[in-house]
Amino acid sequence: MKWIVGLGNPGTTYQGTRHNIGFMAIDALAKRHGIHVTQSKCKALLGEGNIAGTKVALIKPMTYMNLSGESVRGFMDYYKADLADMIVVYDDLDTECGRVRLRYQGSAGGHNGIKSIIAHTGTQIFNRVRMGISRPQPGMNIADYVLSNFPKSEGDQVKAMIEETCDALEFALKHPFDQTMAKYNR
């Protein structure tokens, strides 16, 4: 089984924020394939289904961003899931808004959700889809920025980025991740 973890914060307060773009991608992918991400398990909301003949679990940790690794570890232990079958989807300040960057290893780069996953899995080697949210204007607090909503002016870019992320995730289910990276890292 392949498993895709979208990072974000639970609750309506954070729903449309930059930090929740991972949740938005999971919701869009679930909608495309009629998967309901409603089962409460492993400190997460979970939905299981089939995408292009591949059994998948879509996961939205409910621990808040900084503790995302608890859900990942819980899922791994409960399902005896292989880390090689996981893809993490999350917001990235160092990628411009609207762009998607795929990687299979690296540091957390200051992202607390990724830091938590690295701490709970003991490795920096796992597949990731980084969704660009750009950096804030100089002087703006980063925490305030990531917890703010996307402006209307970026709406089309964000929608297109979510669609591209879903396309990349679908492709990754059937192809090696390095091939997926070659196709989607423009």
Image (cartoon, rainbow, N blue to C red):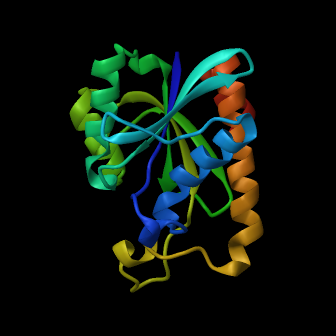
18 relative position to 122: left or right = right
Residue 108 seen in render: no
Residue 147 seen in render: yes
Counting every numbered tag in the picture gives 0
Residue 24 x %, y %: 59, 54
Which residue is found at the position 57% from the left and 23% from the top? 56
Whether residue 72 is situated above or below residue 141 in the rendered picture: above
128 relative position to 80: left or right = right
Residue 173 x %, y %: 65, 21
53 relative position to 4: left or right = right
Whether residue 167 is situated above or below residue 175 in the rendered picture: below
Which residue is found at the position 74% from the left and 32% from the top? 183
Q: Nearer the viewer, residue 153 or 11?
A: 11
105 relative position to 176: left or right = left
Which residue is found at the position 30% from the left and 40% from the top? 43
Q: Nearer the viewer, residue 136 or 88?
A: 88
Which residue is found at the position 61% from the left and 25% from the top? 49
Residue 98 x %, y %: 68, 60
Residue 118 x %, y %: 28, 35
Q: Nearer the viewer, residue 181 or 8?
A: 8
Instruction: Assign the C terminus to one quadrant of the image.
Output: top right
